[in-house]
């Protein structure tokens, strides 16, 4: 009964301590009505997690190294030794576990793009459940250790103190053995999330969007000032090409995005949802790429419907430019068809291509390999980004958070 009472009291004390230590302006934001601010780069700051077996071995070692107070004899010596061993083992378990729990923040405090990556990579539910399991185990261990230490303090004879010490240490190890798998789960989660590419969440981003195989990656390379990089995500085998360029002295990212199929968002797979997350949560300028060459594998009709859907969703809050890719292979854009695709271009195909051009009257024809239209596209981007930045800075009604989300 004494052990149970001490366990409950210790857990209550831990809760009070945790509530006092972990409360932050961000967490209190829903109650105060203030807008929450986000500190990007959370995955890179996750703590290193030791393997469950390493933590167990370390706890036993620290307990055996504990020594009684100097000058004590018989029962007093055994009491001091028993309490110190239990405290050493309890601390060896609970101190790193508390560090882990504090180092894995509530997903509500993530930047929205990182929150989306968490959901795509792992799932919000699994992340929360694992962190909570570690915290519950920590509180259980803390209660067991404190309970047996209190029991020793109330005993009179050295033999029973020694037996209680051994029993308490064994119970700590048994409890940890039963629940310690969550530590290895947390270690795997940390490893997975730290391997995600670090997104520059506050750097203006030009995202090339469209159906699969429409030439987005080639345009990224053509628009980049230097060599583009490849970002790899665990939920796809396809790397995401990313480069950069400058508008005056301000650095901008230009990135490929996974190809989108013409379907509703709730039917999209994880790699498609990465594109939607980019448009939704990063300070993005959209460059929608339409391929009229017939070589992408997606019909012109489906591409136009996809464009219309995304335009309705994002154009009112994101700068938008339309591009017609592979123009060198499209006769109606002044190109010459690929010999292998000659049979594709009959009168009906020409009419369909012209109808598409009419629906996107301000689109810039480009062909990355030949360099067609690239200077004109760069000029349009520079002009649009500069204009959008000026309009954003002149708007006195936006707050700091919305400015950070839209400033290019």
Image (cartoon, rainbow, N blue to C red):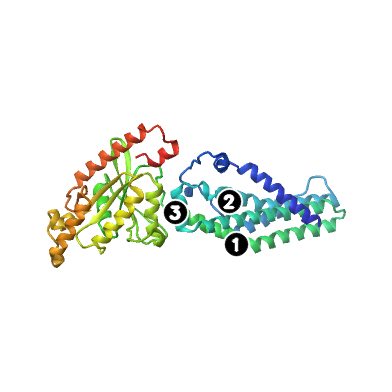
| Residue designated by label 3 | 117
Residue 368 visible, this orientation: no
Q: Which mark is residue 181?
A: 1
Q: Nearer the viewer, residue 98 or 133?
A: 133
Q: Is residue 381 left or right of residue 231?
A: left
| Residue designated by label 2 | 100
Q: Residue at x 33, y 59 (%)?
A: 260
Residue 311 visible, this orientation: yes
CB atoms at circles 2 and 1 under 8 Å apart?
A: no
User: Closer to the observer: label 1 or label 3?
Assistant: 3
Q: Examine the rendered structure and indicate whether residue 334 appears above or below residue 392.
A: below
Mark 1, Cα crowd under 10 Å, few <14 / some 14-19 / many 20+, is some
Q: Residue at x 44, y 36 (%)?
A: 400
How far apart in space, not on screen, are marks 2 and 1 (Cα)?
Answer: 14 Å
Q: Examine the rendered structure and indicate whether residue 109 appears above or below residue 398.
A: below
How far apart in space, not on screen, are marks 3 and 2 (Cα)?
Answer: 21 Å
């Amino acid at each position: 009964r004494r052990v149970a009472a001490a366990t409950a009291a210790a857990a209550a004390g831990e809760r009070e301590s945790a509530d006092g230590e972990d409360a932050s302006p961000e967490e209190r934001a829903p109650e105060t009505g203030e807008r929450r601010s986000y500190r990007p780069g959370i995955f890179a700051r996750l703590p290193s997690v030791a393997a469950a077996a390493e933590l167990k071995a370390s706890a036993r070692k620290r307990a055996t190294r504990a020594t009684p107070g100097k000058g004590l004899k018989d029962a007093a010596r055994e009491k001091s030794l028993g309490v110190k061993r239990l405290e050493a083992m309890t601390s060896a378990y609970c101190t790193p576990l508390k560090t882990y729990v504090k180092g894995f923040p509530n997903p509500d405090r993530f930047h929205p793009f990182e929150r989306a990556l968490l959901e795509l990579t792992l799932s919000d539910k699994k992340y929360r459940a694992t962190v909570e399991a570690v915290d519950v185990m920590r509180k259980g261990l803390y209660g067991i250790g404190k309970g047996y230490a209190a029991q020793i303090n109330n005993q009179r004879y050295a033999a029973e103190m020694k037996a209680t010490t051994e029993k308490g240490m064994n119970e700590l190890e048994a409890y940890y053995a039963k629940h310690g798998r969550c530590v290895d789960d947390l270690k795997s989660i940390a490893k997975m999330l730290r391997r995600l590419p670090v997104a520059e969440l506050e750097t203006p981003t030009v995202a090339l969007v469209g159906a699969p195989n429409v030439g987005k990656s080639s345009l990224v390379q053509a628009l980049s000032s230097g060599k583009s990089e490849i970002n790899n995500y665990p939920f796809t085998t396809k790397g995401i090409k990313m480069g950069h360029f400058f508008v005056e002295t301000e650095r901008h990212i230009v990135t490929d995005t996974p190809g989108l199929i013409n379907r509703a968002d709730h039917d999209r797979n994880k790699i498609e949802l990465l594109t939607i997350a980019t448009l939704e949560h990063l300070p993005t300028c959209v460059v929608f790429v339409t391929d009229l060459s017939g070589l992408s594998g997606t019909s012109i009709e489906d591409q136009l419907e996809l464009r219309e859907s995304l335009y309705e969703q994002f154009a009112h809050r994101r700068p938008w430019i339309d591009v017609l890719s592979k123009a060198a292979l499209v006769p109606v854009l002044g190109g010459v068809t690929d010999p292998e695709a000659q049979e594709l271009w009959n009168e009906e195909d020409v009419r369909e291509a012209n109808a598409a051009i009419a629906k996107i009257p301000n689109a810039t024809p480009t062909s990355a390999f030949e360099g067609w239209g690239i200077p004109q596209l760069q000029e349009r981007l520079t002009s649009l980004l500069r204009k959008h930045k000026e309009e954003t800075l002149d708007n006195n009604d936006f707050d700091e958070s919305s400015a950070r989300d839209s400033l290019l």
